[in-house]
Amino acid sequence: MSEPTGKSSPTVYLYELAWILPSIAIPVGMLAALTVTVFGVGMHLPTVEGRVPAAQVAQTAPFDVPGIKQVGPGRYEVVMTSQIWTFAPNEIRVPAGSTVTFVATSKDVVHGLLIAGVHVNAMLLPGQVTRVTARFDRPGEYAMLCHEYCGIAHHTMWGKIIVEPAS
Ligand SMILES: [Cu+2]
């Protein structure tokens, strides 16, 4: 049996280094990716616009009259409610190049609002107002889905945004 020398072997040192370096590089890489998505791509959390009484969403403005209205040249606002298992409105038509702001909430349980192809991915909580904005440049149909499990017919909860070619 040989006595411990007190010197660490270079193999052990390299082995430790092989773990230490990635454990620094991975968080730094993630932070860089986060910075790019926030400041470069412009992704951010939906803002909390306000609250309405959760039990009286249908009686509280603006959610008593869900629908789409034009608020400026090429700009639209959609007041939207979600309830099992549909969105109101469930079909939205805008010309290509429109910027659409969704002001949405839920009448009953937690729903989601995901619009395929644009940066809309939000939770709709009962009584909490969610505001998200997206620009629709490409004509076509964009699926609008609930992506928070909301009960037995959750999979049927979807609608569409029809972007018509600009005239
Ligand atoms: Cu839902």
Image: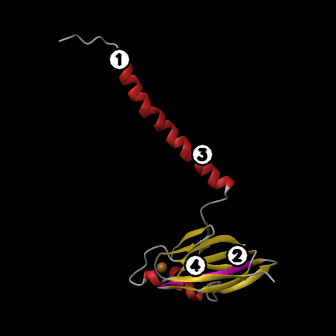
Contact (CB < 8 A) between labels 4 and 3? no
**Which residue is label 3 attached to?**
32
**Which residue is label 1 attached to?**
8
Along the line of sight, the residue nearer the viewer: 141 or 34: 141
**Which residue is label 4 attached to?**
143
Contact (CB < 8 A) between labels 3 and 2? no
Tell me where the magenta segment starts and ends, as one range: 76-84
- Looking at numbered disc 3 in the image, what kind of residue is underneath it? Ala
Contact (CB < 8 A) between labels 4 and 2? no
Dot 4 falls on a residue whose secondary structure is strand
Label 4: how many Cα within 10 Å (few below 14, some 14–19, many 20+) = some
**Which residue is label 2 attached to?**
100
Q: Is residue 164 left or right of residue 47?
A: right
Q: Is residue 164 left or right of residue 56?
A: right
- Which is more foreground, mark 2 or mark 1? 1
Does the magenta-highlighted stretch encompass residue 137? no
- Looking at numbered disc 2 in the image, what kind of residue is underneath it? Val
- Lower sequence index among marks 4 and 2: 2
Along the line of sight, the residue nearer the viewer: 162 or 43: 162
Q: Position of residue 156 (x, y in %)?
A: 46, 84
Label 2: how many Cα within 10 Å (few below 14, some 14–19, many 20+) = many
| CA–CA distance in space, label 4 to label 1 | 60 Å
In this view, 147 is above or below 38: below
- Lower sequence index among marks 4 and 1: 1
Which label is found at residue 124?
none
| CA–CA distance in space, label 2 to label 1 | 63 Å
Magenta stretch, main secondary structure class: strand
Q: Is residue 137 left or right of residue 156?
A: right
For label 2, being within 8 Å of ligand 1 is answered no
Along the line of sight, the residue nearer the viewer: 11 or 125: 11
Q: Residue at x 49, y 73 (%)?
A: 147
